[in-house]
Image (cartoon, rainbow, N blue to C red):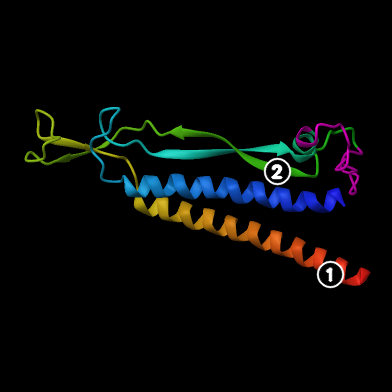
Amino acid sequence: MSNFLNSFDISGYGLSAQRVRVNVISSNIANAQTTRTEEGGPYRRKEVVFKAVNFNDVYNKALGGTAQSAKYQDPLNEGQFGQKVNPAIMSVVVDKIVRDDSKPLMKFEPNNPDADANGYVAYPNINPVVEMSDLVEATRSYQANVAAFQSAKDMANAAISLLQ
């Protein structure tokens, strides 16, 4: 039963990670024209870095035990040549949010209050097309996690109805 509940947790981690990504992309789009920040200078684009984690370790840490309920069994004999295979059940977490330190876009606007001595204003190096494609990708990933969660829920309901 616990293996079955793992699918809900894995989908939950995926939903959470994609939500963070959507929030960061939204922040990038909202600040595409921000020329002044508290740090000084224009807004800097941010990007989310994900990390795959062995879900069995996360699961056991949460339970405070060492049960190997999600032990990998190598059903395809991938490790037959002595190669170590990755655990079958991997989840995703947000590892870090990194700042893009690429050079800002310089536009000649001598009347702008943020213009330098030569009349150039530093704008964030944010491409709206790239941000929108990242947003669509994050949204599709979020929808895929919702679909996986719904499928697991439907299987649970079908199993319960078989027992009735």
Q: Is residue 103 left or right of residue 161?
A: left
Q: Secondary structure at mark 1?
A: helix
Residue 3 percent coordinates (x, y) = 84, 49
User: Which of label 2 and label 1 is nearer to you?
Assistant: 1
Q: Is residue 80 left or right of residue 61?
A: right
Q: Going 59% across and 55% down the picture, which residue do you hit?
A: 141
Q: Is residue 29 left or right of residue 3?
A: left
Magenta stretch, main secondary structure, is loop
Ranked by sequence position, the earlier of labels 2 and 1 is 2
Residue 162 percent coordinates (x, y) = 91, 71
Q: CA distance from mark 2 to mark 1?
A: 25 Å
The 10 Å Cα crowd at callout 2, few under 14, some 14 to 19, many 20 or more, is many
**Does 74 lie within the magenta span?**
yes
Q: What is the number of the mark on residue 158? A: 1
Q: Residue furthest front?
A: 164
Q: Secondary structure at mark 2?
A: strand
The 10 Å Cα crowd at callout 1, few under 14, some 14 to 19, many 20 or more, is few
Q: Going 11% across and 40% down the picture, which residue do you hit?
A: 112
Residue 33 higher or lower than 148, as above or below: above
Q: What residue does disc 2 label?
A: 91
Q: Is residue 71 left or right of residue 93?
A: right
Give the magenta part as a residue range: 61-80
Amino acid type at image mark 1? Ala
Q: Going 82% across and 37% down the picture, which residue do you hit?
A: 85
**Does 13 lie within the magenta span?**
no
Amino acid type at image mark 2? Ser
Q: What is the number of the mark on residue 109? A: none
Q: Going 25% across and 30% down the picture, which residue do you hit?
A: 41
Number of callouts: 2
Residue 109 percent coordinates (x, y) = 11, 41
Residue 22 percent coordinates (x, y) = 48, 50
Q: Residue furthest left?
A: 111
